[in-house]
Image (tube, helix red, strand yellow):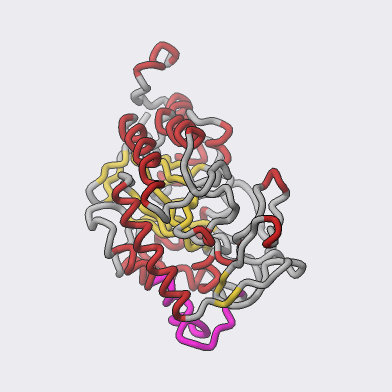
């Protein structure tokens, strides 16, 4: 059959062999931000499993930007070497290596999920968090985040710029700015977490300023011929928060400024969010942004079957489909989906004897 999911798409100078993308997923398996053999196997197996794009987990642009002490980072040159090795393997599998640059803001300094995902105080190896405003994520946290002043804001912008330069050296071919899930950029975007009275707070134009300044810094180092994505939370799922209309407005501006694709997720900002979860529950947001701005979008969130993914792209709701937990369950997801849809795709030659 003819499959839209397995049709190629050109973004800037790159041809994506299909529309299947491995979404960035934290592995909490680093020491001092360094990638390990776990990341090589985790990312590499999904490249050999047939996905067109493999996006490395949220990678901190500075130590205090990590979600946990075990997060990946790209704040020093020594961290480049292992990432370069991983990326070379991904490329050898006819896949594209991507990186998501991130700063967790007030959601930083927590333990790994299997250790309770709890805020670490300073005696436990935690660190002072920062945000748009001195508002905690949970009321009972051991300390408040510090509201970034102008010097702090410029440091974060500089950190994103330096991280981008290292990402280029490491051989990444797609870069995604993480502006979703309640992390630092999102904390500036939403009025629920931004009560500033300076040029970074209040109006929509002021709340998006920080994101646009980071975009400009990233673009100063990122090659013009390579794709640049931005992940956003389309809605906070909370009254008075960031919503889909503001997401459409921001996406129009990002497109005008040279962003190639909006990676459309949602939520994560406040603990009292009320998410209406169900299969493909965020796809309508990607569809609305795509139709109202004509920018490329990706869809993510409880997308688990080949027929579901095929319908998303063939119906024009999104251009790429991001897989997270389903790809954790099945690293060969793209190869299996091709078989289910009756599409002939190349397998790694080492595995071809298992193809039929």
Image quarter in which the C terminus is found: top left
Q: Position of residue 5 (x, y in %)?
A: 40, 39
At 69% from the left and 64% from the top, the residue drawn is 271
Residue closer to the observer: 130 or 20: 130
Q: Residue 16, position in %: x, y?
A: 31, 41
- Chief SS of the magenta region: loop
- Residue 3 visible at all: yes
Q: Nearer the viewer, residue 256 or 113?
A: 113
> Residue placed at 59% from the left, 75% from the top?
146
Q: Is residue 286 visible?
A: no
Between 275 and 54, the residue placed more toward the observer is 54
The quarter of the picture where residue 238 lies is bottom right
Residue pictured at 49% horizontal, 34% vertical: 42
Q: Position of residue 88 (x, y in %)?
A: 32, 35
Q: Is residue 74 above or below residue 160?
A: above
Quarter holding the N terminus is top left
Please tell me which residue is depicted at 52% across the width and 76% down the height of the picture.
148
Name the residue at the right extreme: 140
On the image, the x and y values in percent for residue 212 come to 38, 72
Q: Is residue 205 magenta?
A: yes
Report the number of numbered marks.
Answer: 0
Name of the residue lying farthest toward the bottom: 197
Query: Where does the magenta region start and end?
Result: 193-212
Judge whether residue 260 is colored magenta: no
- Is residue 43 shown above or below 355? below
Can you tell which quarter of the image residue 345 is in? top left
Taking the view exactly as shown, the residue that stands out farthest to the top is: 353
């Amino acid at each position: 059959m003819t499959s839209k999911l397995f049709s190629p798409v050109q973004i800037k100078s790159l041809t994506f062999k299909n529309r299947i993308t491995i979404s960035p997923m934290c592995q909490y398996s680093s020491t001092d931000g360094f990638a390990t053999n776990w990341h090589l196997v985790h990312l590499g197996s999904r490249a050999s499993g047939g996905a067109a794009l493999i996006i490395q987990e949220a990678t901190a642009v500075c130590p205090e930007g990590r979600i946990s002490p075990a997060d990946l980072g790209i704040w020093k040159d020594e961290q480049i070497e292992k990432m370069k090795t991983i990326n070379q393997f991904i490329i050898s599998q006819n896949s594209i290596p991507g990186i998501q640059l991130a700063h967790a803001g007030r959601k930083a300094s927590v333990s790994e999920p299997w250790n309770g995902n709890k805020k670490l105080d300073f005696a436990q190896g935690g660190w002072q968090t920062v945000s748009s405003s001195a508002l905690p994520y949970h009321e009972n946290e051991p300390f408040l985040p510090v509201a970034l002043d102008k010097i702090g804001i410029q440091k974060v912008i500089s950190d994103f710029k330096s991280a981008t330069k290292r990402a280029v050296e490491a051989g990444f071919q797609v870069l995604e700015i993480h502006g979703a899930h309640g992390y630092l950029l999102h904390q500036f975007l939403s009025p629920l977490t931004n009560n500033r009275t300076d040029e970074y707070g209040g109006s929509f134009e002021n709340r998006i300023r920080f994101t646009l300044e980071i975009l400009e810094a990233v673009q100063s180092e990122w090659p013009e011929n390579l794709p640049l994505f931005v992940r956003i939370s389309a809605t906070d799922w909370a009254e008075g928060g960031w919503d889909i209309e503001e997401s459409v407005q921001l996406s129009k501006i990002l497109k005008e400024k040279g962003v190639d694709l909006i990676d459309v997720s949602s939520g994560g900002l406040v603990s009292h969010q009320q998410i209406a979860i169900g299969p493909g529950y965020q796809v309508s947001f990607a569809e609305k942004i795509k139709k109202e701005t004509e920018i490329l979008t990706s869809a993510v969130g409880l997308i688990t079957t080949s027929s579901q993914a095929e319908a998303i792209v063939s119906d024009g709701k999104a251009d790429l489909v991001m897989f997270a937990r389903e790809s954790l369950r099945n690293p060969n997801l793209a190869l299996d989906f091709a078989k289910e849809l009756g599409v002939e795709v190349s397998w790694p030659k080492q595995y071809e004897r298992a193809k039929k």
